[in-house]
Amino acid sequence: MKILLIEDNATIAKQIVEFLSGQHWQVDYARDGEQGIALALNDIFDVILLDLNLPDVDGLDVCEAIKQQAQVVPPILMLTARGSFEDKSAGFHRGADDYLTKPFDLRELALRCQALARRSELHQSQTIDVGELTLDLSNKTACRQGQPLQLTSIGFQLLALLAKSYPQPVSRALIIHTLWADEPPDSDALKSHIYSLRKSLDKPFSSAMLKTVMNLGYRLEVSSDADS
């Protein structure tokens, strides 16, 4: 999973980042509300962990801004010492999906993240459209310009990851972790799968959708992106 933590307390933030990273999740970290909003609007996260007592912007305002402006709206779990019913009610009314009062058990935090991510997936469309590309997540099939693409299981997983992240690039490290978790293959394996995906996705068509992002990874591009 990919988590965004917005927390100004460095000690608490370090504990959370280290624990969730130990679950082999990717954790991005923002120290204040403005930075948190910027990260949330420029990337896709499975869950956002949001402290309410931030130094620059009230956490409730941060929550509302993310819910209203994010391209893919993530579930938000509020972390706060404000434990009254009134505080929780205000949080839920401003868009929070769950609420955890400090201090909390990090194991419970991880369980809540998993539950929120699963709940979010249930409400997501099983079809993704990126330009002339369409993916059916339920049937694990893809087509471009209406033509079915011949993809391996890993090829479909790779294409789905890129499509879910579009228009943002996906790093090689995240691709490798998503595809192979704790058992990454040799360094040439990803190159081989990228080559095979290009053959299916791009070779039969007049323009290439799969682009290499230098020193980072890969992204999907449609013709309107290249023209803009």
Image (tube, rainbow, N blue to C red):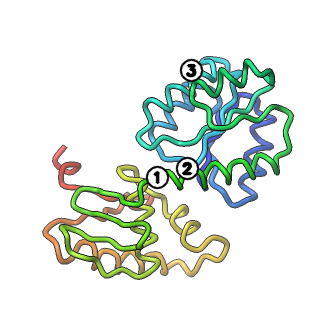
Which residue is found at the position 59% from the left and 74% from the top? 180
Q: Which residue is mark 3?
A: 61
- Marking on residue 120: 2
Which residue is found at the position 50% from the left and 31% from the top? 66
- In this picture, is 24 found above or below 88? below
Quadrant of the drawing holding the C terminus: top left
Q: Earlier in the sequence, mark 3 or mark 2?
A: 3
- In this picture, is 30 found above or below 81? below
Three-letter code for the amino acid on which mark 2 is drawn: Ser
- Residue 17 appears at what percent x and percent y? 73, 46
- Residue 53 appears at what percent x and percent y? 71, 21
Q: Which residue is mark 1?
A: 124
Three-letter code for the amino acid on which mark 3 is drawn: Asp
Q: What's the CA distance linking mark 3 and mark 1?
A: 25 Å
Relative horizontal placement of residue 132, taking residue 40 as reference (left or right): left
Which residue is found at the position 41% from the left and 73% from the top? 140
Q: What's the CA distance linking mark 3 and mark 2?
A: 22 Å
Q: Are marks 2 and 1 in contact (CB under 8 Å)?
A: yes
Q: Which residue occupies the foreground of this view, 219 or 83?
A: 83
- Residue 64 appears at what percent x and percent y? 53, 25
Q: What's the CA distance linking mark 2 and mark 1?
A: 7 Å
Three-letter code for the amino acid on which mark 1 is drawn: Gln
Q: Earlier in the sequence, mark 3 or mark 1?
A: 3
Relative horizontal placement of residue 104, taking residue 46 as reference (left or right): right
Q: Which residue occupies the foreground of this view, 141 or 184?
A: 141
- Residue 192 appears at what percent x and percent y? 41, 81
Relative horizontal placement of residue 132, taking residue 35 as reference (left or right): left
Which residue is found at the position 81% from the left and 35% from the top? 11
